[in-house]
Amino acid sequence: MPDLLYKNISNYVDLSQEDFNQFKKPFEYRKFTKKEIVLKEGDYCNFEGFVLTGCFKVYYLNENGLEQTLYFAVEGWWITDIDSLINTVPSILNIEALEDSEVLMISRKDKENLYKTMPQIEKLFRIMNQKSSVALQRRILSLTGKTADKRYLEFLEKYPGLEQRITQQQVASYLGITHEFLSKIRRKMSLEK
């Protein structure tokens, strides 16, 4: 399973097998069951997790108490609340396993130690943070400037096959629309085929 982690980080930096073995030492292997909460609003996030198997949703509750999903994390994705992790503030996010899942988790302290002992790891996480910032900017632009139809098509492209693994309510929460409106979009698209 760490092979998936090696493949993921190899997209950003070159690490020898020896360096990778040193890099993965502080990661803790964890299993989560479906519906298990990994991070709850109000708690402090002190980890980053690399998803080996399964699926998670990262969400918050809006003023009306409705879920607003920021993103889904499937195999090869990372989970965290970056604001809580970096600024040591209570999380406003929740992270929940949508399937039985396996994750490699690293604490903030262990990550900082890796920065000191392995300079290329700081480069790795800098590049990953830059990519994450780009994805966040695109997500904001999509939510504020695109129709629900286009957001749905982007979802299908960004998360191929995920729609079969999660509920339509969860897809609607990600798109920022109601389940009923999502049903109308799907009906319309099926008629256009």
Image (cartoon, grey):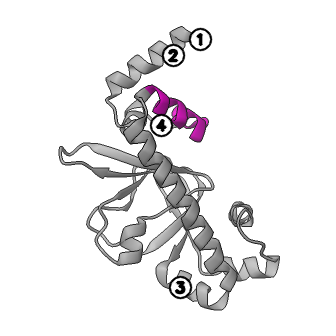
- Among numbered discs 3 and 2, the one appearing first in the sequence: 3
Up-down relation of residue 144 to residue 168 (above or below): below
Q: Residues within 10 Å of mark 4 (few under 14, many from 20)?
A: some
Amino acid tagged 1: Lys
> Where does the magenta region start and end?
149-163
Amino acid tagged 2: Met
Residue wearing tag 2: 189
Disc sitting over residue 166 in the figure:
4
Residue wearing tag 1: 193
Amino acid tagged 4: Ile
- Residue in the picture at 34% in, 27% down: 179
Q: Residues within 10 Å of mark 2 (few under 14, many from 20)?
A: few
Q: Position of residue 143 (x, y in %)?
A: 40, 40
- In this image, 52 relative to 188: left or right? right
Residue wearing tag 3: 112
Q: Quadrant of residue 125?
A: bottom right
Q: Main secondary structure of the magenta part?
A: helix
- Residue in the picture at 81% in, 76% down: 17
Q: Position of residue 100 (x, y in %)?
A: 51, 50
Amino acid tagged 3: Glu
Q: CA distance from mark 3 to mark 2?
A: 48 Å
- Residue in the picture at 40% in, 20% down: 183
The front one of 165 and 141 is 141
